[in-house]
Amino acid sequence: MTTYSDPGYVRTAAREQALEPVRVMFMQSQTYFGADSLIHSLLMRHLDRKSTAVHVACNAGSPAAPSAAYAALSGVPDLSIVPMSFGPTVNSRTRAEVARAAATSALPAALDLTRLVAYVRRNHIEIIHCTEKPRDAFYGYLLARAAGAKCIIHLHVKVEGWMSPLTRWAMRHCDGLVGVSDFVAGSAVAGGFDAGRVHSVLNGLDAEEWCASVPATDIRAEFGVPPERPLIAIMSRLFPWKGHSQLLEALAEVKRAGRDFTLLIVGDDDPRATPGGGRYSTELHRLVAELDLTDQVVFTGFRSDASAIMAACDIYAMPTFEEPFGMVFLEAMALAKPVVSLDSGGVPEVVEDGMTGLLSPPEDIAALARNVERLIDDEALRRTLGANGRARALEHFGPDRLAADMERVYRRVLAT
């Protein structure tokens, strides 16, 4: 397994002149613009055009339902976009629903794939860059093989048995797997994939752009939080692995220890949290009542100004278990917020315990509570960890570092 997360890596002008440009095409089969799409768009924007030529095959959606991804990527300079139809998504659908959708979309998708093969050959594209999404990985691998290109699959989640058979098949046959953290890359090796084909490239964030995008919203006034009361936030889809219930249990101990605080729970229910059709938020509301936290906890639901909430909070706390990377921690650090989380998954690769945040062992509610108490009690420590976090986000997780590391993967795969 190869790690490309050295913050000291800098390309020289001489090296750039010595290298032939790499021609890469990204696959964007989803119409929505999710977290993985955001990372890929950063790559598309920041890959150096002196040494790379960048294309994307993007699901444009339909006149009735235009693609959010197509709209977002249209704003990337020097990016060649090929509108595509990728057929029906398999997410949150039964086999019968997928079959019905495929019956009407199979022919257009096949024709688009044929057209895309011709485009890849005509433009001499060498690398097809996919996510682990089934259509990305499957179509991307077929496209690469039909057009004589290499295929890499960018893994944004831990490799586990639940992954689509189409994805796992493509992973077995592709030319390279890239994890968003050493944790994710290691899960691919542990899952039986060839370590020689596995790479690790840590995610990145345009911290200055992220901070500049924070809207001017008085969050404390909106939720009635006095200036002197510590404000804690957790924001994610409502899903058990994100650690909402563990955080609530820890905060019950914090309250019993005499500390005052307000917690904002930001986000909507994730349908996958309760397969039987229930709502995970219902369980969390019940837990808040049982723990006597009704006066301390506010459920905000989905917020388009989540960055404003993060900017207003004193502590960002999310004890997520086996998080693949944790972009939200990087966002909090960029805003100079101390982080409370777990020593689990890819989190320690982002958050330095004792330097930019406080990490506790999984399932240790008492240790989690002590870390929250420590930050509530010590404003100077909050400022120090926050300042360290912002410096780390700027110095080690910039989009240019992300792009440079990924270009090294491209060149290594092409040389294999």
Image (cartoon, helix red, strand yellow):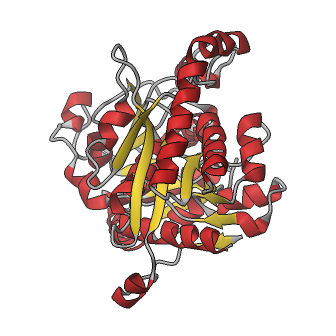
In the image, 333 versus 209, the foreground residue is 209
Name which quarter of the figure residue 272 lies in.
top right
In the image, 71 versus 106, the foreground residue is 106
In the image, 147 versus 186, the foreground residue is 147
Residue that extends furthest to the left in the rendered view of this protein: 216
| 139 to 278, vertically: above or below | below
Question: Do we see residue 286 in this rendering?
Answer: no
Q: Quadrant of the C terminus?
A: bottom right
Q: How far from the left and from the top, in percent, is residue 223?
A: 26, 29
Q: How far from the left and from the top, in percent, is residue 287?
A: 58, 24
Marker count (numbered):
0
Q: How far from the left and from the top, in percent, is residue 415?
A: 63, 75
Q: How far from the left and from the top, in percent, is residue 290?
A: 58, 22
Residue at left offset 55%, top offset 65%: 201
Residue at left offset 21%, top offset 29%: 222
In the image, 319 versus 110, the foreground residue is 110
Q: Quadrant of the N terminus?
A: bottom right
384 left or right of 323?
left
Residue at left offset 46%, top offset 52%: 122
